[in-house]
C-alpha cells in the first residue's frame, strides 16, 4: 500500500525558515528554524508529537496518520529555495547562471516580490547549472 503524501509548504520569513501543514481532521502543525535541515527535523518531531497527542486524547484521525503511512513532501517557495541555496552559493552566482538581475533575486529571497512561473523556472535552471558545474569538479 502506497504512503499518503503530506505536502509541507516551506517559506522564508525575515530570519527563519517556516513551514506548516493542515488537515481538517488532524489540525495544524507549524515549525520555524534557522536552517532547512533543522526545520525538517523540528517539523517531523512536532508532527509526530501532535499525532501522538491526538491519539492519546481520543481524537479521530485518518488511518494513514495513525499508522504512520505517510511521506512528507517539502515544497519550498522561491524565498526558501534561494535562502537554502545561499548555503552553497551566492545570489551573484545564481544571477549569472539564471540571467536574472541580482537585485531582483534579492527581492525574491526576502519575499518582497514573488516571481512568475517562468522566472522561477529560470532560477531553478540556474541552480541546476551551478550544481552540474560543481559535480564536474574532480
Image (spheres, rainbow, N blue to C red):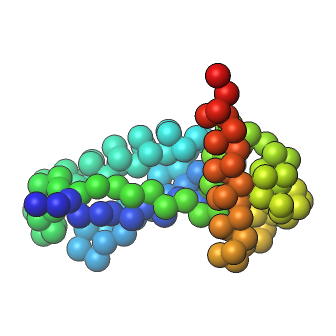
Where is 95 relative to 38, above or below? below
| On-image quarter of the C terminus | top right
Quadrant in which residue 11 is drawn? bottom right
Residue 14 spot, x, y in % from top left:
71, 54
Comparing 56 with 81, the one in front is: 81
Give the quarter of the image for residue 8. Answer: bottom left
Tell me where residue 85 sits by quadrant.
Answer: top right
Q: Is residue 109 found left or right of 73 in the rendered image?
A: right
Q: How many marks?
A: 0
| Residue situated in front as seen by the camera: 56 or 33 | 33
The vertical placement of 20 against 86, above or below, is below
* Residue 80 drawn at (x, y percent): 62, 55
**The N terminus lies in which quarter of the figure?**
bottom left
Q: Is residue 44 left or right of residue 122?
A: left
Q: Residue at x 34, y 55 (%)?
A: 72
Q: Which residue is at the far top? A: 138
Q: Position of residue 123 (x, y in %)?
A: 71, 60
Residue 5 in sight in this render? yes
Residue occupying image coordinates x 69% and y 75%:
118
Position of residue 61 relative to residue 130, above or below, is below
Establish if 23 lies above or below 18: below
Front residue (pair 107, 54): 107
Q: Residue at x 62, y 54 (%)?
A: 81
User: Is residue 94 or residue 13 the one in the foreground?
Assistant: 94
**Is residue 114 visible in the rendered structure shown here?**
no
Amino acid at each position: 500500500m502506497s504512503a499518503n503524501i503530506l505536502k509541507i509548504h516551506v517559506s522564508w520569513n525575515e530570519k527563519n525558515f517556516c513551514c506548516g501543514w493542515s488537515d481538517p481532521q488532524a489540525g495544524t502543525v507549524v515549525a520555524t528554524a534557522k536552517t532547512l535541515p533543522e526545520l525538517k527535523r523540528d517539523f517531523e518531531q512536532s508532527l509526530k508529537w501532535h499525532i501522538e497527542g491526538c491519539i492519546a486524547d481520543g481524537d479521530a484521525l485518518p488511518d494513514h496518520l495513525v499508522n504512520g503511512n505517510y511521506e512528507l513532501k517539502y515544497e519550498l517557495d522561491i524565498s526558501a529555495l534561494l535562502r537554502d541555496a545561499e548555503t552553497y552559493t551566492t545570489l551573484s552566482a545564481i544571477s549569472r547562471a539564471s540571467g536574472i538581475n541580482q537585485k531582483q533575486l534579492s527581492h525574491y529571497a526576502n519575499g518582497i516580490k514573488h516571481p512568475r512561473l517562468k522566472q522561477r523556472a529560470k532560477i531553478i535552471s540556474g541552480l541546476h547549472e551551478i550544481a552540474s558545474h560543481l559535480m564536474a569538479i574532480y
